[in-house]
Image: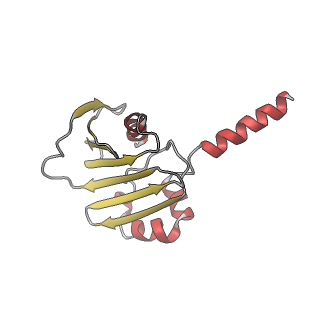
């Protein structure tokens, strides 16, 4: 009985965890929607794209759009979760005005703006010389900001 319960718990956890979110895994899983746009970028920029290691929802689809100085990766679930992660290369100018300043595990400070339907998080990564922006909308609005910060902390 213990083995069965352990097996069942592993299955449940596996079903709740995020899909493989590494660059190579996303290219393989979403060749048209993700890989094709990303392949237009030099390899050095591909390595700088802000990709979360973990998400608080099960990913149904991933798509990307890429320009010379910007990449947007869109993650969607079958439920009410949506995440856009924007990477801005060669950033110039000022960052967006935000309500809160929250330190990330990386040492960067993220600006956070809470809105009714979504949370916006933005920070500068000095090692990569890029700005990362997250727009996150969750099914559970009470946990939305906390989950957005967990996503931000999972981006290397």
> In the image, what residue occupies the spot 65% across and 45% down?
15
Between residue 138 and residue 90, name the one nearer to us: 138
Most distant residue in the front direction: 116
> In the image, what residue occupies the spot 40% across and 33% down?
146
Residue 152 coordinates in the image, percent (x, y): 38, 40
Please determine whether, in this image, residue 128 is positioned above or below residue 33.
above
> In the image, what residue occupies the spot 28% across and 30% down?
102
Give the total number of marks visible in the rendering.
0
Q: How is the image coloured?
A: secondary structure
Viewport quadrant of the N terminus? top right
Residue 67, can we see it? yes
Please determine whether, in this image, residue 2 is positioned above or below residue 124.
above
Most distant residue in the right direction: 1
Please determine whether, in this image, residue 6 is positioned above or below residue 65.
above
Residue 43 coordinates in the image, percent (x, y): 39, 62
Most distant residue in the left direction: 93
Quarter of the figure with residue 45: bottom left
Residue 48, can we see it? no
Most distant residue in the top direction: 2
> In the image, what residue occupies the spot 42% across and 41% down?
151
Residue 70 coordinates in the image, percent (x, y): 28, 60
Viewport quadrant of the C terminus? top left
Residue 13 coordinates in the image, percent (x, y): 65, 39
From the viewer's perspective, tell me whether residue 88 is left or right of residue 106: left
Between residue 142 and residue 59, name the one nearer to us: 142
Quarter of the figure with residue 42: bottom left
């Amino acid at each position: 009985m213990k083995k069965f319960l352990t097996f069942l718990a592993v299955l449940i956890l596996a079903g709740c965890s995020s899909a493989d979110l590494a660059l190579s895994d996303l290219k393989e899983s979403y060749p048209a929607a993700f890989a094709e746009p990303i392949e237009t970028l030099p390899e050095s920029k591909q390595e700088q794209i802000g990709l979360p290691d973990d998400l608080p929802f099960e990913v149904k689809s991933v798509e990307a759009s890429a320009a010379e100085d910007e990449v947007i990766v869109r993650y969607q679930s079958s439920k009410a979760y949506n995440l856009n992660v924007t990477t801005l290369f060669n950033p110039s100018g000022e960052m967006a005005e935000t309500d809160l300043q929250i330190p990330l595990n990386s040492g960067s400070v993220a600006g956070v703006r809470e809105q009714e339907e979504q949370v916006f998080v933005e920070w500068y990564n000095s090692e990569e010389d890029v700005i990362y922006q997250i727009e996150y909308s969750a099914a559970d609005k009470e946990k939305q900001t906390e989950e957005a910060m967990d996503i931000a902390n999972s981006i290397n």
